[in-house]
Image (cartoon, rainbow, N blue to C red):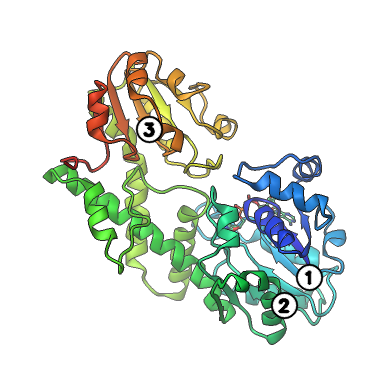
């Protein structure tokens, strides 16, 4: 199959490279010329494990190419995927579809009858219908429009794409179903379930999935608060409920609140859709509020734990919204670090890969080159992102380099007993009574 991918960000680049690896001929288009120049020179615009090698291998086999020119990218493509950003619109949280509609207008001028246009971007219910209307307006005829939401996770994106739990395809005609079945054929061989639905159902499925995961996270965070008040350990509660097949162990990790490029904006967009449809979504509305409050409360939590932070030196470990990515979008580290600086703390932060992204957002702090340097002379160290390397720290060395001896572990990566053995005062999340 010949595929064009409009938008070469996280989703577009990973999907494009994986489709090429399946054997399709893929052209990734982006209007950001510096991104395309970089990719042509082998420089990845994002940090994602395995991506550079995958891109390189498929460029060498001439199955993957990059361009800023939509006409060149789209001509002869049997399927054109749209993977541009759909950020939250300022003010009302509605998904901003400007980039999607702009891309559709551009490609409408150049696609040929029979092409299948597929939204991979997360778009609200009814967006496919609007795309059909725009294509008609622009005089593009005989085009199928389908929805194929993407469920990959940053940090494990290639694996998620190649071994997905499921593929959801929302289509209204047989041509679209046929083309998408052919594109994903290599995955059927691996027995990945493919679910064909109506287009609107597929669009909503993506929001429902993200909202449900956000509910799980906020649920365990509130249980963690209760654990702290009643001397129970949330790690054990999570394990105790997670072993129940009906609940499952994933997304039950108490922490500083969810961030990232998807959950915050997608929960808000779902609420907007519900609002427009006149249907209340009280659970999701509460989760948005609970999570915002949680992220905003972390600086005060650190302040309380230390009896004030003014003039104190605090080592912050991890800035990206989660491990294995340099993505800082809506990261819990942002309100935390800003809150600590506002309270007069001196922050010295370390993240294994997100420093460059973080420097654009978090100013007025120092950046360290490794975790131990961040701990040098610190009154306390705060773990904010659960990078594996923070699990492997030598706590005796860490404690030895600190001035104070408090370890605030907002991700529960450490065993309190081990931390205390290293002479540290340990404060985790929801660990009223650490497990025996
Ligand atoms: P991103 O911001 O990393 O990438 C979007 C890219 O689109 C940018 O490089 C931008 O320059 C380009 N672009 C915008 N308009 C264009 C146009 N008209 N022509 C060509 N290129 C254009 O975004 P992302 O994180 O990849 O997200 C893309 C979509 O996928 C969003 O809807 C998001 O919600 C969804 N999604 C993201 C993830 C994730 O983990 N990042 C996972 C699943 C779904």
Name the image quarter holding residue 133: bottom right
Of the numbered discs 2 and 1, the one sitting upstream in the chain is 1
Q: Secondary structure at mark 2?
A: helix
Tell me if I can see residue 67 in this picture.
Answer: no
Q: Is residue 171 above or below residue 382?
A: below
Of the numbered discs 1 and 3, the one sitting upstream in the chain is 1
Residue 254, percent across and down? 31, 47
Q: Secondary structure at mark 3?
A: strand
Mark 3–mark 2 contact, CB under 8 Å? Answer: no
Name the image quarter holding residue 183: bottom right
State the residue lying farthest toward the left: 230
Q: CA–CA distance between discs 3 and 2?
A: 46 Å
Residue at which label 3 appears = 383
Q: CA–CA distance between discs 1 and 3?
A: 46 Å
Of the numbered discs 3 and 2, the one sitting upstream in the chain is 2
> Could you say which disc has been placed on residue 1 in the image?
1
Q: CA–CA distance between discs 2 and 1?
A: 8 Å
């Amino acid at each position: 199959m010949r595929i064009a991918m409009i938008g070469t960000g996280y989703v577009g680049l990973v999907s494009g490279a994986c489709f090429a690896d399946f054997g399709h001929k893929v052209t990734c288009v982006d209007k950001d010329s510096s991104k395309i120049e970089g990719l042509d020179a082998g420089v990845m615009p994002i940090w994602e494990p395995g991506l550079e090698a995958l891109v390189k291998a498929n460029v060498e086999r001439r199955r993957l190419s990059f361009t800023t020119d939509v006409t060149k990218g789209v001509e002869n493509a049997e399927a054109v995927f749209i993977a541009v950003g759909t950020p939250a619109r300022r003010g009302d949280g509605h998904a901003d579809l400007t980039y999607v509609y702009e891309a559709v207008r551009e490609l409408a001028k150049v696609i040929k009858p029979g092409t299948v246009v597929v939204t991979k971007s997360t778009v609200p219910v009814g967006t496919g219908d609007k795309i059909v209307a725009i294509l008609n307006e622009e005089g593009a005829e005989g085009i199928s429009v389908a929805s194929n939401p993407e469920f990959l996770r940053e940090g494990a994106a290639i694996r998620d794409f190649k071994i997905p739990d499921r593929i959801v395809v929302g289509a209204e005609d047989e041509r679209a179903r046929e083309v998408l079945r052919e594109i994903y054929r290599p995955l059927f061989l691996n027995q990945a379930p493919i679910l064909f639905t109506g287009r609107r159902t597929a669009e909503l499925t993506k929001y429902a999935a993200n909202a449900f995961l956000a509910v799980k996270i906020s649920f365990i965070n509130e249980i963690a608060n209760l654990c702290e008040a009643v001397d129970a350990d949330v790690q054990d509660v999570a394990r105790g409920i997670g072993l129940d097949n009906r609940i499952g162990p994933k997304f039950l990790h108490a922490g500083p609140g969810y961030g990232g490029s998807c959950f915050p904006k997608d929960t808000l967009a779902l609420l907007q859709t519900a609002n427009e449809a006149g249907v209340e979504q009280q659970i999701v509305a509460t989760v948005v509020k609970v999570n915002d409050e949680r992220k905003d409360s972390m600086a005060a939590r650190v302040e309380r734990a230390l009896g004030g932070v003014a003039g104190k030196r605090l080592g912050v470990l991890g800035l990206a919204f989660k491990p294995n990515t340099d993505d800082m979008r809506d990261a819990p580290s942002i309100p935390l670090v800003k809150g600590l600086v506002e309270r007069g703390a001196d922050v010295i932060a370390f993240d294994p890969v997100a420093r460059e992204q973080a420097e654009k957002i978090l100013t007025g702090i120092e950046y360290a080159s490794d975790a131990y340097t961040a701990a040098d002379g610190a009154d306390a160290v705060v773990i904010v992102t659960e990078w594996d390397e923070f699990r492997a720290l030598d706590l005796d060395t860490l404690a030895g380099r600190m001035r104070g001896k408090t370890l605030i572990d907002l991700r529960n990566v450490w065993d309190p007993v081990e931390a205390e053995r290293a002479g540290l005062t340990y404060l985790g999340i929801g660990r009223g009574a650490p497990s025996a």
